[in-house]
Image (cartoon, grey):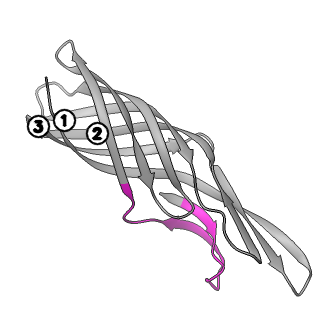
Amino acid sequence: MFSKLYDARSSANLKQMQFFPLPINFHISFGIRFLEHYKIDVRTGLMLVSEDYWAGDKGIFFQTDIPDSKFYGTAGIDFANNGGEAHGVVDYSESGGRTTYYCLGVGIRTSKHFNAELMYYFPVDKVFGYNNVYDFNTNTSTKYDKINYGMINIGFQYLITF
């Protein structure tokens, strides 16, 4: 996830682009393949990115095979419900709400039962929370929005077909 967050522990405080390197993302997918080269998936699962962003999500994805290759393209829409943490006393932090993502990606079928996929999630609603930071010197507080610029999802699928 690429984001802009306020960080009270940093001397720069406002991190313009923060990258969360190893989030946990687990999904269960149910799909129907039709006309030999097309597939529609319904995916539901969890995105555990950071204490500020963890969401249950569900979406619908369309997959099309690239002719005469093991590669495929995927497009979809994903609906996430962020349950991020609120914390702090002097610095108050709030996260949460619903976010819709437009998703584009590519994948490769390495065997009958295994796929690898790379997707980019474009958020429709970029602001997913805020930090309210109180300054004792001036007796004022400043509000910083938490902004989600997008997510890269590298996934591995084990397929069970009926």
- CB atoms at circles 3 and 1 under 8 Å apart? no
State left or right for residue 52 relative to residue 64.
right
- Between marks 2 and 1, how big is the CA–CA gap? 7 Å
Q: Earlier in the sequence, mark 2 or mark 1?
A: 1
Quarter of the rendering occupied by the C terminus: top left
Part of the protein shown in magenta: 3-24
Q: Secondary structure at mark 3?
A: loop
Tell me the residue that label 1 is attached to: 71
The residue sitting at 17% across, 36% down in the picture is 159
- CB atoms at circles 2 and 1 under 8 Å apart? yes
Q: Which one is closest to the eye, mark 3 or mark 1?
A: 3
State left or right for residue 35 relative to residue 51.
left
The residue sitting at 44% across, 35% down in the picture is 58
The residue sitting at 63% across, 51% down in the picture is 96
Tell me the residue that label 3 is attached to: 113
> Residue flagged by tag 2: what amino acid is it?
Val
In this orientation, which residue lies closer to the viewer: 139 or 71?
139
* Res. 145 visible in picture: no
Looking at the image, which residue sits at the far top?
Answer: 35
> Residue flagged by tag 3: what amino acid is it?
His
Res 38 label: none
In this orientation, which residue lies closer to the viewer: 144 or 89?
89
- Badge 2 crowding class, 10 Å Cα cut-off, few under 14, some 14 to 19, many 20 or more, is some
Q: Secondary structure at mark 2?
A: strand
Give how far across and how far down residue 158 sits, in percent: 17, 41
Res 106 label: 2
- Badge 1 crowding class, 10 Å Cα cut-off, few under 14, some 14 to 19, many 20 or more, is some
- In the rendered image, the vertical position of residue 154 relative to residue 11, given as above or below: above
- In the rendered image, the vertical position of residue 82 relative to residue 60, given as above or below: below
